[in-house]
Image: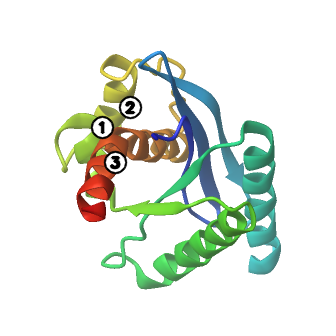
Amino acid sequence: MFESSVLGVDPGVARCGLAVVGRRDRANELRFVTTVTTPADAEESVRLRAIAEAARAAIAEHRPAAVAVERVAWSRNQVSALHVARATGAIILVAAEAGLPVAEYAPNEVKQAVTGAGNADKKQVQRALQRIHGLGDVPSQADAADAVAVALTHLLAAPMRAVAARAGAR
C-alpha cells in the first residue's frame, strides 16, 4: 500500500526544512511545513538536538508513514557537506526511533520528479509544486520548499516502489 503521508527533510545544521505532504482523494496536500533555524554560535551537538527534537515533534503530531531526506551533495563544499551529513544522521536516528522507513533522494532526482527537469532551479521547483502538484501553500523559504519537494518526490515514487516490490516477490 502507498504511504498516505511523508515527512520530507532538507537537512542542514543552520536551517533544516521539514514538511509533511500527504495524499487524499488523489490530491496532494501540504499538512505541515517549517524551517528549523539554529543559532550559529551554539555547539553543533545543541544544534543537532534542536533539529532532532523538531523532527520528533513533527512525527508525533502528523504521523507520517515514511521519511524522505535530500541526499548530501558531496561535490560542493566538503566541510559544509559534513555538517549536513550529521544533520541527516540525526534525522535518520529519529526516524528509526519512530519505526519509520527512510529514503534518500539526490537533488537532481527531486527536481526531475517535481518539474520533469533534473536541472531546474529553486523557483521552477516552487512553481511546479504550486501549479502542477496543487500545493498552493508552499512557502518561498528555500529550505522549507525543498522539504516539500522531497516529500512529494517520495509520494510520486510510491507506485514504482509497489511495482518493484511485486516484481521482486516473484
Comparing labels 3 and 1, the label whose residue is closer to the camera: 3
Q: Residue at x 24, y 62 (%)?
A: 170
Residue identifier under label 1: 114
Q: Residue at x 19, y 50 (%)?
A: 118
Residue 130's spot in the image, x, y percent? 39, 21
User: Disc 1, disc 2: CB below 8 Å?
Assistant: no
Q: Residue 15: which quarter of the image?
A: bottom right
Residue identifier under label 2: 126
Residue identifier under label 3: 162
Q: Residue 91: which quarter of the image?
A: bottom right
Label 3 sits on what residue type?
Answer: Ala
Comparing labels 1 and 2, the label whose residue is closer to the camera: 1
Label 2 sits on what residue type?
Answer: Gln
User: Disc 3, disc 1: CB below 8 Å?
Assistant: no
Q: Residue at x 30, y 21 (%)?
A: 132
Decide which of tag 1 and tag 2 comes sooner along the chain: 1
Q: Is residue 32 left or right of residue 25?
A: right
Q: Is residue 60 left or right of residue 26?
A: right
Residue 162's spot in the image, x, y percent? 34, 48
Q: Is residue 125 above or below residue 57?
A: above
Kindly report the distance in space between the C-alpha atoms of the residues bearing marks 2 and 3.
27 Å
Indicate the secondary structure of the residue bearing disc 3. Answer: helix
Kindly report the distance in space between the C-alpha atoms of the residues bearing marks 1 and 2.
9 Å
